[in-house]
Image: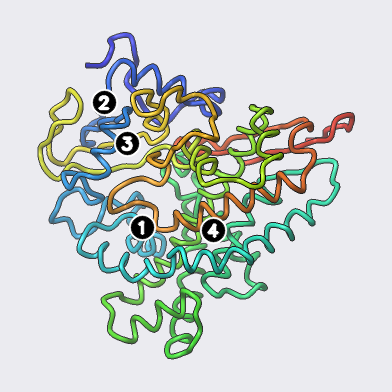
Amino acid sequence: MPSATLPRFTLTGWAREDIINPYPVYQRYREAAAVHRGEASGDAPETFYVFSYDEVAQVLSSNCFGRGRSLDAAAAAVPVPTDQKALRAIVENWLVFMDPPRHTELRALLNRSFSPRIVTGLRPRIARIAQELLTRLGQQVETDLVAGFAAPLPILVIAELLGIPAERHGWLRANAMALQEASSSRARRDVDGYARAESAAQEFTEYFREQVYLRRGSTGDDLMTILANAQLRGAPVGLEAVVGTCVHLLTAGHETTTNSLAKAVLALRAHPAVLEELRSADGLTADSIAEFLRYDPPVQAVTRWTHQDTTLGDWEVPRGSRVVALLGSANRDPARFPLPDALDVRRTADRHLGFGLGIHYCLGATLARAELEIGLQTLLDGLPALDYSVQYVDYADDMVFHGPSRLLLVNPGERFCS
């Protein structure tokens, strides 16, 4: 049972220093107990927070837990107010909020577009985009690696995957960022966040509906055309599911890769010996990429609901309870990873939970690894100031999609202007 000296855990109201480095907080709770019950709040369901690797893996892989509040729920517990109609219609069609059989049908349709073969074919285009972004950064005195590199890279890659023309890329990125304002932890702090997200959802819905109609019967090999033609062939995927999937790929594949890249840079700057080791190596390895995702994953927590009474840690968790699996804590569990607070790029970290586990294991994991590898290698090769510049970091006040909102690198001796 949890220690009486620890307050009830929550993912909101964190101090800035704890947002930047949440791992000592996780450690205190994990050492006290694998699972902690949250503060009861009115009619809200009971919430349990899961900190240890084994119990997090149990939540992610067991059919006792799902995205819907119950096995017979028509839809998952979508965290969007009912009056945000366009936004809710999109989010209800996101793969991450689906349970079988609907999840199984859509995932099977999408799997081939994210196969290792397809991603291998994308690698030259990812490298070209990364190099173009690096060139634009040039020799600026102040370099914001988030705005100038980490954020646009995945958006531009997903745009190519979906077959969205270059003239739409600015609009695409602006609307993808507006949708992020509907994140439950962010919308509570900004009364206009849902309004901006709703407007972006309306624009996205209109655009993707039109594109699906235009691409039906065409011979393109982009993902949007594949989805449109699958629907034409009678695949069990409706128009709204195609629209929601396209938007989901933009948002899920955007912020997570952005955070991964920015946090990998921060990790290297905090470990100069590792930075030097990677700079002198022939290239980044699969183990080194896995280690960055283990050490500081871009998604710190995911939510599930119990579909039947079950045992989790020392708790009897009743059906209908909310369970929050803390991926960041699980990835630092010494019972699974020796010396978990060390950044060891030689570690075999293939069982990290940065991409989740079970049926909701990240669909775009292969693409995300390629983007992180190519993006980080581009910075190691082409940005000498990566290790000697002064840094200024702002973190988004979000303990779910976790990462810097700004990462300025300023050449020494130059005046910093905020």
How many residues crowd around disc 1 within 10 Å: few (fewer than 14), some, or many (20 or more)? few
User: Which one is earlier in the sequence, the residue at label 1 or at label 4?
Assistant: 1
Q: In the image shown, does 191 or 379 lie closer to the viewer?
A: 379
For discs 1 and 4, the disc positioned in front in the rendered view: 4
Which residue is disc 4 drawn over? 176
**CA separation, marks 1 and 3?**
29 Å
Viewer-nearest of discs 3 and 4: 3
- Please report the residue visible at 62 percent of the width from the left and 66 percent of the height from the top: 171
Q: Secondary structure at mark 3?
A: strand
Q: Secondary structure at mark 2?
A: strand
Neighbour tally class for label 4: few under 14, some 14-19, many 20 plus, Cα within 10 Å? many
* Crowd around label 3: few <14 · some 14–19 · many ≥20 (10 Å): many
Does label 2 or label 1 sit earlier along the sequence? 2
Inter-mark Cα distance, 2 to 1: 35 Å
Residue 189 visible in image: no
Residue 52 coordinates in the image, percent (x, y)? 31, 28
Please, what is the three-letter code of the amino acid marked with disc 4?
A: Ala
The residue to which callout 2 is attached is 35
Secondary structure under the numbered disc 1 in the rendered image: loop
Q: Which numbered disc flags the more N-terminal residue, 3 or 2?
A: 2
Examine the rendered structure and indicate whether residue 393 appears above or below residue 253.
Answer: above
191 or 117, which is in the foreground? 117
- Give how far across and how far down residue 259 sits, in percent: 55, 44
The x and y percentages for residue 188 are: 44, 40
Residue 83's tag is 1
**In which quadrant of the rendered image does the C terminus lie?**
top right
Residue positioned 43% across, 65% down in the render = 115
Secondary structure beneath disc 4? Answer: helix
